[in-house]
Image (cartoon, rainbow, N blue to C red):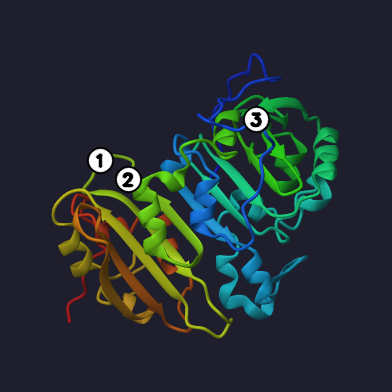
Amino acid sequence: MSGLVVAGCGGAEDPAPATSGARPPGASDSPVTGAGESSGLREMMKALSAGGPAAEYLEYGEMTHWRELGVVTASGPEKKEERWLPAIGFGFGALGSSARLLPERTGIDVFGAVRAVSLGNPPNTAIRIDGKQDAAAIRTKLTALGAKPRTIGGQQGLTLAADGAIDPDSALTSELGLLNQLNQVVVTDSVLVSGASADPVASALGGSPSLAADPDHAAIAECLGDVVAAAVTAPPAPTAVALYGVGLRRPAATTDQAVNVVCVLPRGTGVKETFTGKLTTKAVTQSGTPLSDLVEDITHDEVGSGDGAMLRATLKIKQDGPVTLVLKMLHTGELPRLFDPSTPLDPLDLVDD
């Protein structure tokens, strides 16, 4: 499953849990609606507020495609397709890790979803799941767990705890391993949004401008192409890179070669030289494995022109290599050292010929 940590750490009491949550600029008064079945990363960005924590980090994943390929069924992963299983949890955050147990306790259906996105950095995080859900059943089960009505982002939702609170003795924590990812919930029959606090949840209900309207995020989505798992992040502090994204291109069949993509939007000098010089098959992972053992080929090109030109690397993964290689390298923190000249030096470097 995904390597994203989404637990919020705040413990302050919410003085008015019945009606709170910042409303995104331009948010609609109408109920939240889901994106179309054939959308993708760019379409999911249209559902997120550019002013919310998704601008800092988002992780995206599609479940429909894995069902179509037989990698998962309505009841869970298929072991016969073990090679692709590491890719199926992206976007679902901690809800993906508890996917088998969620329906009985909460009514939430992960394996029947269309797509999902996890957004933000702790403690300002949320999870949005698009696709058919039994909203009435979810509300009933969460109410039985103690949820109360709460208006979030101008829409009717439920609250199980104060913003950021963690109850180690709750059933969700003890039985499902969920710390506070269901503190605040908004659910319809086509979309579920949850999080530790109301503000990030509200931002995942939509708003104007959307994240897709941001030129940098739109360019990253275009550069990544047709991906079924992806992550887009802004460096936590100013660096030579403005934004970067990684992804797994959509395989047409389970026998296909896995193709990973890295897209980088430079802000300073030296990025292209670092990227093309270090992200090669001569690079070594943190575990000491040469990329040449995992990757058949790495090609570099540019998307766009001028100040908005995006640097791109396309990695053809070997049949026995990890299909989510660049996503793993992003989560371990080793990937930025291969394209950002302002990143501190690390043992991850080039292997002598």
Q: How crowded is mark 2: few (under 14 residues within 10 Å), some or many (20 or more)?
A: some
Res 178 seen here? no
Viewer-proximal residue, 194 or 289? Answer: 194
Mark 1 lies on a secondary structure that is loop
Q: Mark 1 points at which residue?
A: 238
Q: How many numbered discs sit on the rendered protein? A: 3
Left or right placement of residue 140 versus residue 185 in this view? right
Q: Name the residue under label 2.
A: 235
Q: Which of marks 3 and 2 is nearer the N terminus?
A: 3
- On the image, the x and y values in percent for residue 329 come to 39, 62
Structural distance between the alpha carbons of marks 3 and 2: 34 Å
Mark 3 lies on a secondary structure that is loop
Q: Are marks 2 and 1 in contact (CB under 8 Å)?
A: yes
The residue located at (58%, 82%) in the rendering is 253
Q: Which amino acid does label 3 sit on?
A: Asp
Q: What residue type is labelled 1?
A: Pro
